[in-house]
Each structure stands twice: as structure tokens, then as C-alpha cells.
Image: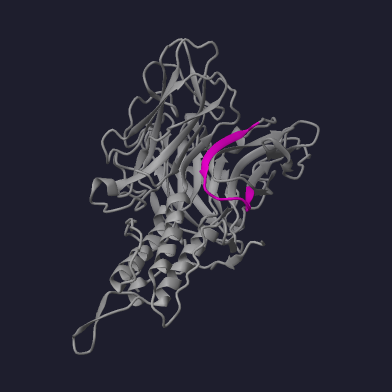
Amino acid sequence: MTVDYSRQLRWLTAVETAADDAVTPALREMAYAINNYKAHAGALKILDGVFPGAHVQSADGLTGEIIELILAMRRIPDGYDRIHWNLCGKMNAAPSGQTCTWRLYSMSSPYPPHTTDVLDTTLLSVYSSSAITISSTSSQCPAGKTDLKLSRGSADGTYLMLTSQNSSSGSGHYSQLYSVSATAQVLY
Amino acid sequence: MASQRITAARTWTPIDIDGICRNYSLDKNGVAFRYKATAAAVEALVTGINHLLAYNNARISFQQCCDFETRQVSGVDPLYQWTLNEQNENGRVQHWRMVIASRSSGTGNAYAHRYGYTSVRTPYQNYTAYTPQFPADCRHTMLEFVRGGARGLISDALTTVNGYSIIDVCVQDEPTPTLDITIDDVALGGAVSGQEIVANVIEDLRQAFYAVRANYLPVLFSWSAQGATGSPASPSAIGCVSGSATFTNVLDNASATRTADSPGIMCNALRAGRGDPSKTDGTKVPVALAILARISTSPSGTGEYRIIGPDHVASNQVDITGISATTATWYTSGSDRLYMNSTVGVDDVTTARNKIDVLGRVTNAADDVYCYAIRGWQTIDL
């Protein structure tokens, strides 16, 4: 199989002749463009969290994995296999070496209404997760991740959830987010 | 006349064109002979285009989340606002899916509704928790309606009533397993196996695909404050304030320049451009912009916003100026475009990364300018 997703759109002028030479290049160019649209130009952005003042933050004083964001279902069309995501945040003023790990989960069904916000992985349905770590007290936008597998339920929907986990239980050793972003992607 | 509908393929099949369409091939004697285009190639493209129209075009028009502590606990009219260059014609079913929390106070019916349409609303959520807990007091709900209207720039909004508390909302069109051939830019095919492919079949296909590629493009970044009347002293969920004559980042009200790590909004535009990505135009993914903003009452000057994109092209910024309205008003970039970078993915960490920074300032330091929503959607025009 030689499917090409990466070739960007090339505009075609109107097809006006009936010669094979004109038809075949047009068909091939359109095939590349349709594959490219599916994988890239038309890919859905499924998480767009923007938090002025970095008002989403990890729990001060705790080192457990804490649920921070629970999202409604996103319906993802067939053909997408992965989620590419990244975030922008910082550590609150803290001694060097303290970090916070943010994890994005993709689940086939919603996280149940548990009595605590400490994540219980035994309650997760079919899921995958991926982590990005914040370590700087200045605004930091670490390298994004491309390894999160999309988990979908029967309605083609995925449920996203974001958790945080501090490395230190010391007071003030928490992380704050300015933004988090995720896009569905085709694996090829 | 009743509209005619065709069924679109729910599953996506990558189009492997080499196997069914090529100019020349070699026979067993090593002699090149001309390949004709086949009906199978046309049908593969038709299937692909219609799948995109029916399923990929179920776009997410708006989404906004917050953490449990930041949720609004009083009704806000409207709570969230957005605008969009909508390219779907009449007849799309739209779902506004939400995660809500039990209200902590209030009497009377609690619900959310489409702004201006009280009949388009969620079920009531009249339970009042003594002390709402997360995630125990959270649930998923939805409102649904058939969205009418022609194509063009539209604005929409969500209102909450009597303490209805929203953690997340996602506004998304439903897929349309069958397409209306009169309004949905459908590809009809027309190629018959064993017969020559004629030009009008290819031309119809070309027009159908280009309608998809030019019009049905995603929202790349979006934010809405909770309400559009607040006067926050610092950036928060109820708005961003800029009170200096120097441009400063609206997310932290401090950063004066865009760097690889300054507070910004991320997006993914890898390989979403057109043309050769080794040339400048091929690296550009054009984005149209809109900001919901107002200036403080009795202003002495106006407000301005500067949206800065990746530095793969020079001076990649758009200024939205002349903000003079004292109630929240949409200001757009008009024909100006910001350009995302088609050559980098989410794992890039340079200033060429697909991150936008929004900076604000006032022309007179006696004023404050407030931003309540930021929108950027992909376009085709460079």
C-alpha cells in the first residue's frame, strides 16, 4: 500500500479535455489531497482549554494523581487513531527540582461519579494516557506528545480527562496551566 | 420536488491511487504502455469525498472547559459566546454536550439554553447539593436542535439559568449518514466501468472536493470567558484585562513578547497548507481571527490587540485596532490572515511552533480594554 497523506493540496485548474493525460494526473492529485485533508487539513481539534491567569492548577500539598478536567464526549470520525496534544504552564514558586506531571486520558466511556478526585484507575474503561511534565517556574511549553492512542466507544465518541500529579507535597509546590490542546490524528 | 439523498460511507478507506490509476506501466517485455484511468479510481474519490462531507464535516464549532473550582455557580446570560464562518447549509443536527455539576444554591428551574432560544434547552437540573463534590456531583447531559441558516459568519452563545453549573461544553454537528444532493456539495461520480472517463465527470469531482477543501475547515483555537460584562483586575475566567500603553500578553498580563515558551494557545497545523512546503507559501496555513472585546466606560482612547503566530514567516501578526465599544462586541481580522506553520508538529519547541500569543494594549493609559473571547479558524485564502 502506498497511501500518501503528507502531500499538501495542489490546486487543479478546470478539467476541460477528455484526454487520458489530463484525467489521470487530476485523479491522482485529488486522491493525495483527499488523504491529506483527512489526516491534516481537516483534522478535528478536540480539546481547546485556555485558562487566563493560569487558573487551572494542580492540588497544593498533594502527590497523588488528581483529576482536574472532565470533558464531555467528542465524536471522532472513523480513520483517526491517535491524539496529538500539548500544554503551556508553569510551576508556582518552588525550589528547583519540583515538577508536576499532567496526564491526558482518552477513554471509551465517562469516568464514573467517584466520591474523590483522586484518580482510581480501576474505574477506568478502555483507555490510554500520555504525560507531559512541567518543571519551570517561568512559563513553559514543553514538547507536545504524539503517543496517545484514541479510545472510542460505540458512538465513535471519546471522553477526555486531564489529571495532575505533583512531585512534592510541600506547600506551594504546584503547577498552573495557561492552555492545553489536543487534535485527532491519523496514524501512518 | 423532494430532495434526493445518497448514503455516505461511515468507514474511512485511505485512497491508494497507484493501484488503480497511473499514466504508464511496464509489460512483461519491459515495454511501457499507457494506462487508462479507471472507473474504480473515480469511485474511490467519490467515496472519500462523501465520507468527508458526511462524517469529517461534523465539526466542533465551540468548546470550553474549566476546572470544578472555577465553574460559574450563578446563571449567566450569555455564559459563553463564539463566532464562526459557518459553511454547512441548513439541516445539520447540532449537539451541545456538557458536563455539569449540581448547583450549590438557587431556587427555580435550573437549565442551560441556546442564547435567544429558551425552548432549545437542557433538561432541568433542580437538585441543590449541600456541598457539591467533584466528580461525584457531575453528570453528562446534552441539548439537541436542528441548526438552520445559510452559510456565512454567524455568532452563537450559551446561557445558564438559576445556578446551572457547567464544567465543559462541546458544540458539535452530528454526522449525516445520508447527504442531500441539492445542498451538500455531494460528489456524484458518474464513471462507468468499461467506458471512457470523460472530462465533465472529473470536473464535477474536482468542484465537489474543492468545495470541501476550501470551506469545511476546522476551528484552530478558541476561548470564551464566563460572561462578557466583568471588569477583572487581572486575567481570569471572567475575562482578560489590558491597561497599559505597551502590548502585554493577555494570559498573564506580563509578557511583552512572544517566545517559544510564553503563555499562548497551541494548535496543530502540520501539513495543512497547500503547495510545496519547501517554499514559503507552502508553509502557510491561513487563519481568520475574531475577538470579543470592549473598552472601559467613558474612554479617552481605544483598545488594540496583537495576535502573533509562529515565526516561520516574517511579521506574522495581525493587529485588531480601534476597539471603542463599551459593551462586548466582535472585532474581526477582516481580510488579514495569521499563518500557522505547516512544517512543524506539536512536538516542536522553537519559536516556529504553532502557538499564538494574544497581546493587548490601550492607546490611553487611563482606559482598560477587556477581552472575553478569542477565535481563530482555518481558511483557504492566502
* Residue B83 forms part of the magenta stretch: yes
Position of residue A144 in the picture relative to residue B233 (left or right)? left
Per the rendered image, the range of residues in magenta is B78-96
Image coordinates of residue B184 in percent, x first then y, are: 55, 57
Q: Is residue B162 visible?
A: yes
Q: Where B249 falls versus B2 (above or below)?
A: above
Q: Residue at x 45, y 16 (%)?
A: B302
Position of residue B381 in the picture relative to residue B12 (left or right)? left
Between A181 and B326, the one lying in front of the other is B326
Image coordinates of residue A140 in percent, x first then y, are: 37, 37
Q: Name the residue furthest bottom.
A: B29
Q: Is residue A141 visible?
A: no
Q: Quadrant of residue B37?
A: bottom left
Question: For the stretch drawn in magenta, what is the main secondary structure?
Answer: strand
Q: Residue at x 60, y 42 (%)?
A: B168
Image coordinates of residue B91 in percent, x first then y, are: 63, 53
Quadrant location of the N terminus of chain B in the rendered image: bottom right
Image coordinates of residue B166 in percent, x first then y, are: 65, 39
Between B81 and A121, the one lying in front of the other is B81
